[in-house]
Image: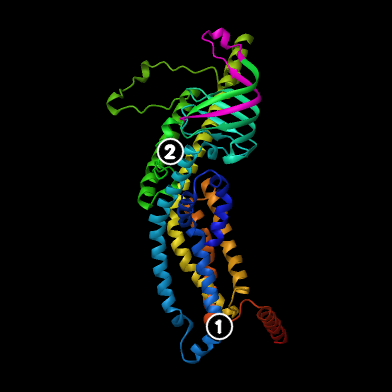
Amino acid sequence: MVIFIFQGIWLFIDDLAGKGLGIVIIGKFLFYFIPTLVDKVLPLTVLLSSILTFGTFAENYEFAAMKASGISLQRGMRSLIVFVLFLGVVTFFFANTVIPKSEQKMFNLRRNIAKVKPAAAITEGVFSDFEGTGDGMNIKVDKKYGEQDRFLDNVIIHKKTDQNVNSTVIKANSGELISSEASDIIQLVLKDGHYYEELRPKDSEERRKHPFAKSEFETYTINIDISELNDQDLEEDGNITTDKMKNVGRLIKDIDSLGKNNLEKVEAFSKNIVNRMGAFPLKKLKKDSIQPINIAKTEVRTDSIKDIDDFLGSLQEWQRLQVINNAKNSVSGILNTVIAKKDELQKRYKFYNSHILSLHNKYALAFSCIILFFVGAPLGAIIRKGGLGLPMVIAIVLFLTYYFIGVFAGNYAKEGNIHPAIGAWLSTLIMLPLGISLTRRATADRGLFGFGNIFDRIKSLFKKKDEDSEE
């Protein structure tokens, strides 16, 4: 746990330290962060501890004494098996209750810190939303430095309109955040920069000319009102927005609603495309509306146009060009609509798949602790080494294999390349046959795939061939 906490410190401490938050707030953040590490820490802990325990037993000939007394390996593992099964049940309840609440607390604490301390909302090298400020804007800086990161280098600001459109761009070589505890205004002072704004005149003819205003400045001050943030509670809970913040009941409910919603979106879009293409499905006639037809009085007409070439050949040249251009424009418009809708639907289904993945991950975490115990315990009995040397190396290699398979499978599942349930269970299912094989070998007191065993099998095959040839 300490190792993974240090990893978390490397990830988040730059956004927390030096912002005047105090050790209590940083301590709360780390406290909320610790439960989110259980899905990584617990399987590794079970694997390493089982290898260390049974490796020490085997190294001190405890298993030899147990077998001499008539006690099998399974009987010696019985009490630990009961404990690991209990641990799996506790892990599921922990993943279903504590981890989602911890994720929510950590998310809200980071968001509220960013609101109270605007400098904490600015990340170097990327565009960041300036939350909670009545003026919608995105800001990007190359570097922050000085007391509480108040000085900024290479500032780029996109101001948003009421329609959430970036129509104003401000670029400055440097900037400074000036604030006072007695004031509800934060001043962003920009120096040596350019101001660019797109104009939207009322006249449509003028709008087609795309007018804009451009200017240079030595000093430009932006006043940001933060009066609404004075009473901001750092512990305030916001809405549950991500799949990691939901328990099993909420995930099942949201998966059902998201699946139906996505299906409705696809069906509505499909109907829209069919209507735009001019292809209309045949309507089914009611039985009562069908009338008998008198064939003798019916005049049968045959269509002289059999294909598109005949149709185009019947038109004049200017009509033919007009039809072809209209068809090209119609097809290109439909293709652009499909491409734009494809990105939206991919995001929707990625969100949907992440919910299914999180649901199965809660169950897979509990089973992974059980299965990795049956990997580590017989492995320790086979290698017959205790301490933190070889067992630590083997445990880390096995865990990294298990972890990276889970990460890659999860990413594939979110993109829809494989089913999310397979993405959640793949690493656990790969370890299952390994655990069965190692348990059988440890029970039979056989080695761990040694070269001697391989050579013995090769020799036995050659001996069998020689005997068959002699016969």
Q: Position of residue 273 (x, y in %)?
A: 48, 27
Q: Position of residue 423 (x, y in %)?
A: 51, 54
Relative to the observer, which residue lies in front, 286 or 442? 442
Residue visible at 54% across and 63% down in the picture: 430
Relative to the observer, which residue lies in front, 36 or 253? 36
Q: Is residue 183 above or below residue 105?
A: above
Residue visible at 41% across and 67% down in the picture: 87
Badge 2 crowding class, 10 Å Cα cut-off, few under 14, some 14 to 19, many 20 or more, is some
The span picked out in magenta is: 183-212
**Outermost residue, left direction?**
288
Q: Are marks 2 and 1 in contact (CB under 8 Å)?
A: no
Q: Position of residue 454 (x, y in %)?
A: 67, 78
Residue tagged by mark 2? 262
Q: Identify residue type, mark 2.
A: Asn
Q: Identify residue type, mark 1.
A: Ala
Relative to the observer, which residue lies in front, 401 or 413? 401
Badge 1 crowding class, 10 Å Cα cut-off, few under 14, some 14 to 19, many 20 or more, is many
Q: Is residue 366 magenta?
A: no
Nearer the observer: mark 2 or 1; the answer is: 1
Disc tally is: 2
Residue tagged by mark 1? 58
Q: Is residue 87 above or below residue 354?
A: below
Position of the C terminus, as image quadrant, is bottom right
